[in-house]
Image (spheres, rainbow, N blue to C red):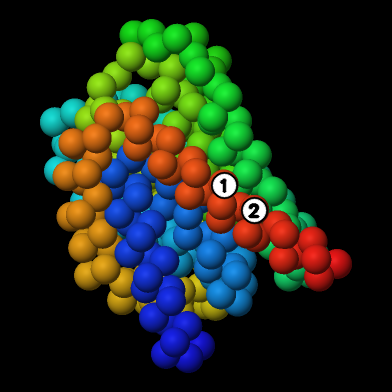
Amino acid sequence: MDILQIIWIGVVVFLAGMLQSAIGFGFALFATPLLILLGLPLPSVIVLVSTCSMTQSTLGAVKLRHEVPWRLSLLATVVRCLSVVAGLFLLKKLLGFSTVQIRMAIGSILCLLVILQIFYHPIPRPRIHWIWGGLAFIGSGLLSGICGMGGPPLVLWVMAHDWNNQKSRAFLFATFAAAVPVQIALMGLNFGRSILGSIALGLLMLPLIYLGSSIGLPIGNRMSKERLRKVAYAVLLIIGISAIVPAFLQR
């Protein structure tokens, strides 16, 4: 890994941290496809993004700690961690494909998740049936294990509640921060010491994550939830398409 690649990784991490601080999700959705395009292997990307996301989510959860529904966040974390195991099994299957196929798969997953969120408009309610929470938590864990992009199922579930902007982001921050250490530990069991370099690089990016979070949080507090979401969706769709098209042309 040369210095130019590290600089580009830093730029991606900074922007991803700013995005997630503003809307409560999007770090992995933004960073994963771009880091793969920079030439990093998928397991390394997942560990790097998880390390950075944990730091950023912890900062957000601490700043919004009075808004976090802690009991609900703990339940979501436990279910997600259990389903990450199945996701890691599928990740090992995905690694049997070529780099071009992996890029196309990640780009397609990203576009599908964003399109699903664009067209899913539930009527916000104080509470929804527990089965939807179970499906969201399990789906989030599976996607976290497969490609590190476990945010969308949780976001869809949060959108179905009549929570304010601060509570929505607080729940997402707390849940992501609590589950990531378990995910990294499971990655270590599956891929060994090869993940240590990605963890070290993620820790090296701490100042950029902090800077991005410091910029993103005030933006999220000033802008409406709907406007932030539209901006995020546009950016994520562009990234997903940019991952699919070059991969398709190289086939």
Residue 204: where, in percent of width, then height?
A: 31, 76
Residue 96: where, in percent of width, then height?
A: 79, 65
Indicate which disc residue 137 carries.
none
Placement of 173 over or under 138, stated as above or below: below
Indicate which disc residue 237 carries.
1
Q: Give the residue displayed 51% in from the left and 73% down from the top.
A: 195
Location of residue 168 (image quadrant): top left
- Give the alpha-carbon distance from disc 1 to disc 2, as whole Å: 6 Å
Residue 188: where, in percent of width, then height?
A: 52, 66
Q: Nearer the viewer, residue 100 or 77?
A: 100
Amino acid on which the number 1 mark rests in the picture: Leu
Q: Secondary structure at mark 2?
A: helix
Q: Give the residue displayed 60% in from the left and 30% down from the top.
A: 116
Placement of 182 over or under 114, stated as above or below: below
- Figure label count: 2
Q: Give the residue displayed 63% in from the left and 59% down from the top.
A: 242
Q: Nearer the viewer, residue 17 or 172?
A: 17
Identify the image quadrant of the C terminus.
bottom right
Give the residue at the far right of this rendering: 251
Placement of 161 over or under 167, stated as above or below: above
Q: Give the residue displayed 38% in from the left and 8% down from the top.
A: 125
Residue bearing the label numbered 2: 241
Binning the other alpha carbons within 10 Å of mark 2 as few (below 14), some (14 to 19) or many (20 upward) gives some
Amino acid on which the number 2 mark rests in the picture: Ile
Query: Is residue 85 among what the camera can see?
Result: no
Is there a contact, CB below 8 Å, between mark 1 and mark 2? Answer: yes
Side (left or right) of 155 relative to 61: right
Give the residue at the far bottom of this rendering: 2
Q: Secondary structure at mark 1?
A: helix
